[in-house]
Image (cartoon, rainbow, N blue to C red):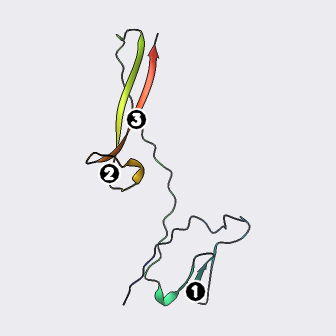
Amino acid sequence: MFQFTTTTVINENKDFTNKSKVLFEASDGVLKIKRHNNFKKENVLAIYKRPATDPKLAKVTFTIPGTLKAGFYRIALYVRLSGNNNSYYANDFVFKGKPFYIEFEVK
């Protein structure tokens, strides 16, 4: 028989179309999520709650030598994608990624 599984992520119990309305409610052993599905207690294997965490932004520091002559310069980086198949980073190389350029002028 066909085994169907789904993963539903809920950020908050507010409907995005109207913040004064709730997105889901539970009663009589059934979790009802608007515009999605009704989940009966006997059919649900697990429900997990994970508190939100603040994002950690990456930071890169370059030390540019003070002996640069006047002119335009470019830093060329290749940002590589690992552990994901996002098509935005697809290319003709073996690994996925995108070039990223930073240009600046020294006067």
Q: Is residue 39 above or below residue 94?
A: below
Q: Quadrant of residue 100?
A: top left
Q: Tell me where residue 19 appears, x and y as whole percent.
A: 71, 64
Q: Within 10 angstroms of label 3, few (less than 14), some, or many (20 or more) residues? A: few
Tag 3 residue: 100
Mark 3–mark 2 CB contact (< 8 Å): no
Q: Residue at x 39, y 29 (%)?
A: 61
Does label 2 or label 1 sit earlier along the sequence?
Answer: 1
Q: Amino acid at mark 1?
A: Val
| SS label for mark 2 | loop
Distance between mark 2 and mark 1 Cα atoms: 39 Å
Q: Residue 82 — which label?
A: 2
Which of label 3 and label 2 is nearer to you? 3
Q: Tell me where residue 21 appears, x and y as whole percent.
A: 72, 70
In this rendered view, identify the residue nearer to me: 57 or 71: 71
Q: Amino acid at mark 3?
A: Phe
Residue with the most extreme left position: 94
Q: Within 10 angstroms of label 1, few (less than 14), some, or many (20 or more) residues? A: some
Which of label 2 and label 1 is nearer to you? 2
Which of label 3 and label 1 is nearer to you? 3
Q: Tell me where residue 67 appears, x and y as whole percent.
A: 34, 10
| SS label for mark 3 | strand
Q: Amino acid at mark 2?
A: Ser
Tag 1 residue: 30
In this rendering, the count of numbered labels is: 3
Q: Residue at x 74, y 67 (%)?
A: 20
Distance between mark 3 and mark 1 Cα atoms: 49 Å
Distance between mark 3 and mark 2 Cα atoms: 16 Å
Does label 3 or label 1 sit earlier along the sequence?
Answer: 1
Mark 3–mark 1 CB contact (< 8 Å): no
Split into 4 quadrants, where in the image is the N terminus? bottom left
